[in-house]
Image: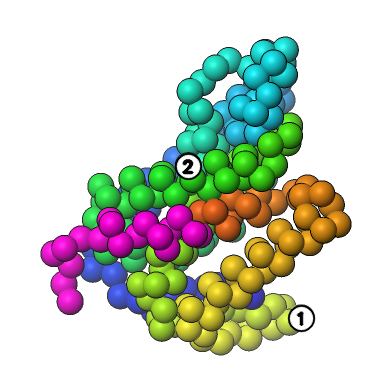
Amino acid sequence: MIPIRDTAPCYTRPYVTWGLMFICITLFLLVKASPVQFHHYIIQVFGMVPRRYTDPEWAIAMGYPFDYYFSFISNLFLHGGWWHLIFNMWFLWIFADNIEDRMGHGRFIIFYLLCGFIATAIQCLYTPHLVMPVVGASGAIAGVLGAYFFLYPYAKVVIWIPILLLPIFVEVPAIAFIGIWVIFQMSKATTSILFYEGASDVALWAHLGGFIAGFLLFRFFLRKDYPA
């Protein structure tokens, strides 16, 4: 199921959402166009490598500088490939404008970064020996989905069901679409634990952690002057 758009009204321009998308896309293009060694350096240093923080001796031996956990935030603006970027930006485009609308620009950026930080921290907690860098806005976007799940449960999400690439579009309630997304993440995370010792090529714990952070924290960031 691929979401195309939602039907929830938005009363303000989502400048922060647009800014986040611009930064992610620009950084991706710049890093992609850079020499391979520089590309590798950026992803390794500014992506979040769990073992860097759970095994200080290993980090020193590998030459990692102490960064005061900055990569827990900087990784949110880096992406591993085109599809990774496209899907994250697409979800951000569809769902984040309404959450920014309900929170206001300033509160939304704090909420977004906080969810992303918590998501990254939970991924580090569950995969402490991982030496591959975790990158992507997915954890923060999962926080947005957590807020959307409770603020717009019955808003319609138009989804495309790609059966033989036919134009099959259906509308489903947001609570159903996001609920299925959460169940899928939990299923994959459980499978990775049972059969692959927690290893996965997707930051599943960051997704789940971001979602939990989003639905627990969103109420503290809502505008009090939002039109009823």
In x, y percent, where is residue 48? 60, 34
The amino acid at mark 2 is: Phe
Return the x and y of residue 11 as percentages of the image width and height: 23, 68
Q: Which residue appears at 73% of the width and 36% of the height?
A: 130
Q: Position of residue 8 (x, y in %)?
A: 35, 76
Q: Give the residue at x 82% y 58%.
A: 194
Pick the residue in front: 146 or 125: 125
Residue type of the residue flagged with mark 1: Leu
x 29%, y 69%: residue: 10
Q: Secondary structure at mark 2?
A: helix
- Find residue 227 and report its image quarter: bottom left
> Which numbered disc, 1 or 2, marks the residue closer to the eye?
2
Q: Secondary structure at mark 1?
A: loop
Residue 53 appearing in the image: yes
Image quarter of residue 37: top right
Residue 19: x, y in percent?
Answer: 37, 46
- Compared across the picture, whether 162 is left or right of 182 comes to right
Q: Residue furthest right?
A: 195
- Label 1 and label 2: CA atoms lie apart by 39 Å
> Pointer 1: what residue?
164
* Residue located beneath label 2 in the image: 117
Depth check: give the residue in front, 170 or 132. Answer: 132
Q: Is residue 156 above or below residue 67?
A: below
Can see residue 13? no
* 223 inside magenta stretch: yes
The magenta span reads: 211-228
